[in-house]
Image: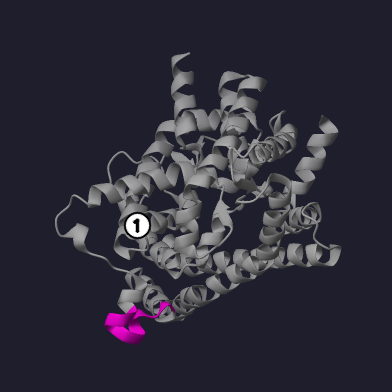
């Protein structure tokens, strides 16, 4: 078991850009692609993910001066918002971590063969989203089997949720043959943002406003172009956060660059995924008969190619920061959460069908809910993080520990 765990940790420590080429190449060979074509697809997807990481980092760097400015306005927070990288790393320490990938893959293949699901989850990197709740349960209940059961159950749930959102996902983002299996967002962020949109439907006036980037472009011409919107938003953020002109211009250019580059790097990933999707569909049709649909489960980051998601992100972040500073009862400044707003916006845009105003409203409201929940679950989160040997001093929490399964686990642990 220790040897298997060491192998798994070694693989996952390389990051998604290294794991994806390996997984894609192996899948290509399984689906009867030629070796050269499988390697090319794997490397292309990996390069696309490298580009995606660079563009996301550019977005974070461009927003950083404004975020730092707002962070200095408040004090007195008692909980550290540590961010998903630390929580994800802690999850791989649990004793059943080494079993999760082989069990998850075997169960997935079996369910596809039984035609119970159409989703083939190849997003090995994001198995951490199954492991984090399992690790949370393990440290709170001190049970190997409860922790493993929670992780496996969520890996299965991700497949069925992936089936449910696939048509909406493909229509909104134009990502044919794919879905997303990042369960913290598909089974938590998306349902809440859908509910927020349902509530907006009952608000007179607001329910009639349909603001999309396409409509903005038609109404205001060049000022509705994504690159121009990015530059304006970046400059405005710099001005509002009292940055010198030497910071404002790079912020404006950085966000403008993100608006242009993000769809292009996602396009590179799709260039590598498309041959795999076609081969998988042909292979499964031969194995299971006609009318066999198969969707490749991928990271939610694939949805960042839509300019509306980036626009929603850059407008929502300063609003979230202001609310975090001035709303009563908030126990942490959302440093870690701000790294996830980019991905929250993907689900918000999906729920609002591209309506920019609704996307911003639902992103902000959901983030505020999460900030409060992070504070509530902090004692349980701290027990997990310290049990995993993170060396955390004081209390810590994170967005990925606020899913309904973690909230239920924590509530039950307080009772028993």
Can you name the residue that lies furthest to the top here? 416
The kind of secondary structure element at disc 1 is helix
Magenta segment includes 221:
yes
The reply, left or right, for residue 24 in relation to residue 147 is right
Q: Is residue 176 above or below residue 335?
A: below
Q: Residue at position x 47%, y 67% from top?
A: 306
Residue at the spot of label 1 = 352
Can you name the residue that lies furthest to the left here? 204
Place of residue 282 in the rendered image (x, y in percent of width and height, measured from the top left): 70, 56
Q: Residue at position x 42%, y 62% from top?
A: 313
Q: Is residue 351 above or below residue 224?
A: above
Place of residue 167 in the rendered image (x, y in percent of width and height, measured from the top left): 48, 54
The reply, left or right, for residue 223 in relation to residue 408 is left
Q: Main secondary structure of the magenta part?
A: helix
- The N terminus: image quadrant: top right
Can you name the residue that lies furthest to the bottom here? 222
Q: Residue at position x 54%, y 47% from top?
A: 83
Q: Nearer the viewer, residue 44 or 397?
A: 44
Magenta segment range? 217-226
Q: Nearer the viewer, residue 411 or 65?
A: 411
Instruction: Determine if residue 82 is in view.
Output: no
Place of residue 281 in the rendered image (x, y in percent of width and height, measured from the top left): 67, 55
Place of residue 33 in the rendered image (x, y in percent of width and height, measured from the top left): 80, 60
């Amino acid at each position: 078991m220790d040897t298997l765990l060491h192998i798994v940790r070694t693989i996952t420590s390389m990051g998604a850009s290294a794991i994806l080429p390996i997984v894609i190449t192996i899948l290509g060979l399984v689906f009867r692609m030629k070796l050269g074509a499988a390697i090319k697809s794997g490397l292309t997807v990996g390069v696309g993910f490298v580009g995606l990481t660079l563009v996301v980092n550019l977005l974070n760097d461009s927003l950083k001066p404004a975020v730092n400015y707002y962070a200095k306005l408040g004090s007195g927070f008692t909980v550290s918002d540590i961010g998903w990288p630390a929580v994800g790393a802690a999850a791989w320490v649990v004793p059943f971590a080494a079993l999760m990938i082989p069990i998850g893959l075997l169960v997935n293949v079996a369910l596809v063969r039984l035609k119970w699901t159409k989703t083939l989850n190849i997003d090995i990197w994001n198995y951490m989203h199954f492991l984090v709740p399992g690790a949370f349960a393990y440290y709170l209940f001190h049970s190997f089997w409860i922790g493993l059961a929670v992780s496996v159950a969520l890996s299965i749930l991700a497949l069925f949720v992936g089936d449910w959102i696939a048509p909406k996902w493909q229509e909104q983002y134009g990502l044919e043959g794919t879905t997303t299996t990042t369960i913290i967002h598909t089974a938590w962020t998306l349902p809440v943002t859908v509910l927020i949109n349902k509530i907006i439907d009952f608000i007179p006036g607001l329910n009639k406003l349909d603001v999309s980037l396409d409509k903005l472009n038609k109404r205001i011409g060049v000022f509705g172009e994504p690159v121009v919107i990015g530059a304006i938003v970046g400059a405005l953020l710099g001005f509002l956060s009292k940055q010198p002109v030497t910071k404002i211009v790079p912020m404006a250019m950085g966000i403008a660059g993100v608006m242009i580059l993000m769809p292009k790097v996602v396009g590179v990933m799709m260039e590598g995924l498309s041959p795999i999707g076609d081969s998988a569909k042909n292979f499964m049709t031969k194995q299971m008969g006609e009318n066999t649909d198969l969707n490749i489960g991928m990271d939610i980051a694939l949805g960042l190619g839509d300019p509306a998601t980036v626009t929603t992100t850059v407008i929502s972040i300063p609003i979230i920061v202001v609310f975090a500073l001035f709303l009563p009862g908030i126990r942490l400044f959302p440093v870690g959460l701000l790294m996830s707003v980019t991905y929250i916006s993907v689900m918000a845009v999906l729920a609002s069908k591209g309506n920019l105003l609704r996307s911003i409203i639902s992103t902000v409201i959901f983030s505020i809910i999460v900030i409060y929940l992070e504070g509530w679950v902090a004692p349980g989160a701290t027990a997990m993080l310290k049990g995993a040997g993170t060396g955390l001093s004081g209390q810590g929490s994170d967005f990925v520990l606020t899913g309904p399964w973690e909230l239920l686990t924590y509530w039950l642990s307080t009772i028993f």
